């Protein structure tokens, strides 16, 4: 190991102080939809994954059994999706179901407005519990907004899930150079530590809107310059809107633009940049959850 690598490894394991509280406050993109009326949560009936499965209310589950009760918002499409299969909450007749995404289908587009979940195309329609049922298994329907208790919901965000971003090119991971928490620090690729060791500058998470952030300081990938760096996140900065799409990290505002290892270099410390998608291994990533 070179002296430079030894210094780098030491900095990564013992990063500067100053971001503990920020990391602890981070919230992930996944959530339960809990009824304020019954205290039950929304579930895909029977945990079924087929298109058109109805949504019901059920006692809250935890762990692997909860996948049919966990949802996330996809701001790019305005949809609310199931973690189980990425299907969207959809209107079928007067029922609420899960269906594959259909571009331009207004019945799949939703607003989270205070305690209410309203249809974006027709805000007078809101998520409701059929017959104001309190029992587990009560079905959800779409109904005119009346403000009643059965139309009121709480979004319960879950703790973030951290992951490494592993390159298909060589198995190295996306890394904050030197474990430096300062704004403007370059993002590079680097070898993973030996054994099962995990270091914060190689761990990432998706925030409530799906934007990829660093565990180290909650900063976001910023492609405002030639190479990607970490900076404090701004919702109005189009160069920070990096999200997952399959095995790519794409810019939400231009999904043909992806995170790319510059020059397909295989050395530790190789820089990353934003580049048009070419389906090459240096543009493909896998999230390995810890």
Image (tube, rainbow, N blue to C red):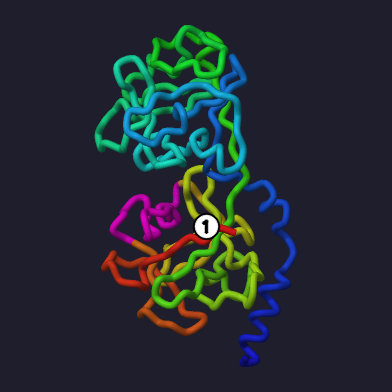
Along the line of sight, which residue is nearer the eye, 249 or 40? Answer: 40
Image position of 104 (left or right of 244): left
What residue is at 38 percent from the left and 69 percent from the top? 260
| Residue 46, image x, y percentages | 46, 29
| Magenta-colored span | 236-257
Is residue 4 in view from this perspective? yes
Q: Which residue is mark 1?
A: 220
Quadrant for residue 224, please give it: bottom left
The image quadrant of residue 17 is bottom right
Q: Position of residue 15 (x, y in %)?
A: 70, 70
Q: Residues within 10 Å of mark 1 (few under 14, many from 20)?
A: many
Q: Does 91 sit left or right of 146 as displayed?
A: left
Residue 176 percent coordinates (x, y): 57, 69
Which residue is painted at 50% across and 19% down in the image?
Answer: 137
* In the depicted structure, whether residue 93 falls above or below residue 267: above
> Magenta segment: does it hold 242?
yes
């Amino acid at each position: 190991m070179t002296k430079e690598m030894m210094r780098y490894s030491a900095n990564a394991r013992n990063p500067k102080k100053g971001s503990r509280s920020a990391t602890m406050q981070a919230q992930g993109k996944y959530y339960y939809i809990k009824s304020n009326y019954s205290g039950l949560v929304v579930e895909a009936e029977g945990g079924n994954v087929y298109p058109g499965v109805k949504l019901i209310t059920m006692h809250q589950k935890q762990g692997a059994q909860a996948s049919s009760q966990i949802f996330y918002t996809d701001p790019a499409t305005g949809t609310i999706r199931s973690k189980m299969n990425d299907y969207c909450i959809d209107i079928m007749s007067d029922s609420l179901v899960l269906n594959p995404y259909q571009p331009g289908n207004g019945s799949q587009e939703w607003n989270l407005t205070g305690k209410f979940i309203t249809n974006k195309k027709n805000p007078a329609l809101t998520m409701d519990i059929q017959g104001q049922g309190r029992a587990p298994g009560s079905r959800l329907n779409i109904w005119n907004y009346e403000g009643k208790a059965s139309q009121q919901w709480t979004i319960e965000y879950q703790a973030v899930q951290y992951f490494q971003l592993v390159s298909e090119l060589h198995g190295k991971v996306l890394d904050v150079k030197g474990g430096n928490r300062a704004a403007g620090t370059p993002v590079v690729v680097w070898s993973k530590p030996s054994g099962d060791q995990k270091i914060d500058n190689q761990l990432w998470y998706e925030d409530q809107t799906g934007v990829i952030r660093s565990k180290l300081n909650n900063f976001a990938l910023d492609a405002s310059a030639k190479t990607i760096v970490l900076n404090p996140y701004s919702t109005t900065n189009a160069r920070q809107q990096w999200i997952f799409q399959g095995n790519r990290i794409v810019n939400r505002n231009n999904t043909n633009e992806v995170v790319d290892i510059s020059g397909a270099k295989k050395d530790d410390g190789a820089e990353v940049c934003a580049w048009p998608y070419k389906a090459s291994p240096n543009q493909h990533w896998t999230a390995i959850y810890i």
